[in-house]
Image: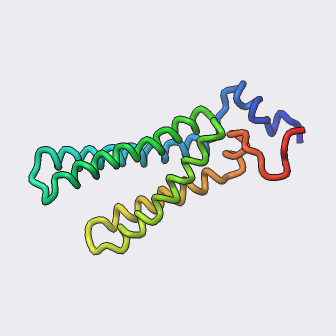
Amino acid sequence: MSSEQNPTPEAAEEAGVRPGRLTAAAALAALEGLALVAGGAWMLVGGLTGHPDDRTSAVTGGVTLIVLALLPLLAARGLLARRGWSRGPAIVTQIMALPVAYNMLTADSVAIPAGIALAVVAVTALVLLVNPATTQALGIRGPGSARK
């Protein structure tokens, strides 16, 4: 196999080629970040304008969700720019989403479809992030493959 068929991350960067798996993983991370922003804004606005049982908790929860949205949004931006550091926060985001999805699935409410969607997105993003093509595109080397 020649190096033209299997380009190095540097050659791929020069050519402007980004694997579809990497773009899809970035899109899923961005989707999760935007969902957190939307949920946080909904809680914040509801806490400030509505009549919640505990206004302080509603406002604090909304601000917390908006701040938490920074992690997947920054990871998505890094993935699109092919920065190796971005895979870690993206993976952490997916791992944090799995227990949330489980809690939504065990609820006896309208949260079950949202839990299914979140679980599918988190597992899909994890598979895309650990894919060898994604790892290679980000320039991440495994153990024992240090540069000489």
Tell me what residue is drawn at x 50 percent, y 57 percent: 122
Judge whether 139 appears above or below 142 on screen: above
**x then y, percent, for residue 105:** 37, 70
For the C terminus, which image quadrant? top right
Which residue occupies the extreme top position in the image? 14
Which residue occupies the extreme front position in the image? 56
Tell me what residue is drawn at x 30 percent, y 45 percent: 63
In-image side of 47 versus 115 (left or right) = left
Colouring chosen for the image of the structure? rainbow
**x then y, percent, for residue 13:** 70, 29
**x then y, percent, for residue 132:** 72, 50
Judge whether 17 appears above or below 120 on screen: above
Tell me what residue is drawn at x 70 percent, y 46 percent: 135
Which residue occupies the extreme left position in the image? 51
Seen from the viewer's position, the closer of residues 43 and 63 is 63
Q: How many marks?
A: 0
For the N terminus, which image quadrant? top right
Seen from the viewer's position, the closer of residues 134 and 90 is 90
In-image side of 39 versus 47 (left or right) = right
In-image side of 48 versus 136 (left or right) = left
Which corner quadrant of the image does residue 115 belong to? bottom left
Seen from the viewer's position, the closer of residues 33 and 50 is 50
